[in-house]
Image (cartoon, rainbow, N blue to C red):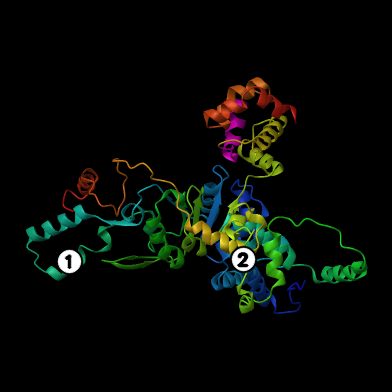
Amino acid sequence: MSLPAPAIGAGVLATNILHFARLLRRAGLPVGPADMLAASEAATRIDLGNRQQMRVALRATMIHRHEHQELFDQAFARFWRDPELVKAAAAIEMLAAGKAPPPEKAPPGSRRLAEAMAKPREKPEPPDPKQQEIDMVMTVSANERLQKMDFEAMGAEEIAAAKAEIRKLTLPLDLRRTRRRRPDPTGPHVDLRATIHQSLRHGGEK
Amino acid sequence: MSLPASVAETAALLEAGGYVADTALATTVHLALAMSRPLFLEGEPGTGKTEIAKVLAAGLGRRLVRLQCYDGLDLAAAAYEWDHARQLMAIRIAEASGAADRTALSSDIYGRAFLKARPLLSAIDPDLPPAVLLIDELDRADEPFEAFLLELLADFQLTVPEYGTIHAATPPVVVLTSNRTREVHDAIRRRCLYHWVDYPSAARERQILARKAPNVAETLSRQIVDFVQRLRKEDLFKLPGVAETIDWASALTHLDQHELTPESVDETLGVLLKYQDDIAKIRGAEAARLMASA
């Protein structure tokens, strides 16, 4: 797996933040250019030697939802590593290459991240025109598979598909119509009582 | 008072105000102050989100301007309102005194004297000392209201159509809080630094208790924190926050309890849990089990 490792040297912090933002974006987090600029500015305001401060600074500027925090923390742990440690780990990996890799169960959420790290390009390949005829017998529709899947275990593409499906759902609210009205500034009815009450504040003039 | 220059100084400032913050929170607060960006705090109720704004105001020597959001909050109650009655009076006085300069009068009655400042305008008023603006429980306001905030949060300015644009002389420190009863729009989130305020760890909760309820005995404080920490792992409708822990500790002290007993827990459970279903579930055997697993 080709991991986009942080570049080492002076003046590359901004580049690394840019790569990190792209990684997050590939993992499905909405990180825009403005977030990237904010992150670069935040990095100048903290003690860069302090890993915890760096993590919090990037998180506060790039993440705007609690749900994204888990994925961010995993991405941070894998992207911002000690370059010396990475070299050592690579050496150990070469030694251990002959042995069978230990079976490991990936932590939830890491699949999307692994996909994002493995795939440096942003655009999907054009579909192969030869693969048009597919035997559909005995297959399950992709939607049916998504219905039973854990969100955490989904890949980036599946998350996008699930989001599209969720957007189509309508909540079964307002099944029973009621005559009772709710205040709504853009509603179709005039609330005479509230209107008069409000105009009393202006001496009945407005 | 000038802004703190480092994360350590920010942590010290919060500490001096009686707020026990973890490193993550201190870093985020420091960044919000240094970059003059609004701070958006989300988390369960009773985890000390509102308190941060109060401590910052006291620590920085600024006035605290608080806007409590509610359903139906509108611009007139949040930002500014023209003093209609006074405008009318001014016109009538002008008529009675025979002053007939209509252009002067019409520009006069839309002057600053007739503009009633509500919290948002007051926070950026250049004639007043710098402020800490607390927009509390933003999730309770309706969605159109969030749009009013965008101009203020991005540029610290407010446009009054009849008057002009009012800029803040010193950018206010803005703290927004939300309990997540509704998702706050991305446009607001993008303009802020985001921090999720979690329940504190046992060690930090003991520190908080020592600061906020200093006359609670050491043993009792440890037992209380252990009990509450275990209670938060239970499946309850509303988990107790830090505020409840502090209340409970002072309640037990007022009742002259020096350590937790199943009876005292049962009697005072209402301080900790605010829903009858939760109380019924924990009272008696369950509370004893939670205490025994200490």
CA separation, marks 1 and 2?
61 Å
Chain letter belonging to callout 2: A
Magenta span: B238-254
Q: Determine which residue is flagged by label 2.
A: A157
Q: Viewed as shown, does residue B61 lie left or right of A95?
A: left
Mark 2 and mark 1 in contact (Cβ < 8 Å)? no
Residue B227 visible in image: yes
Q: Is residue A176 above or below residue B89?
A: above
The mark lying in front, picked from 1 and 2, is: 2
Classed neighbour count for the residue bearing mark 1: other residues with Cα under 10 Å, few (<14), some (14–19), many (≥20): few
Q: Is residue A11 above or below residue B112?
A: below
Q: Position of residue A96 (x, y in %)?
A: 91, 66
Q: Determine which residue is flagged by label 1.
A: B106
Q: Viewed as shown, does residue B38 lie left or right of A82?
A: left
Q: Is residue B248 magenta?
A: yes
Residue drawn at the location 76% of the way across and 77% of the way down: A8
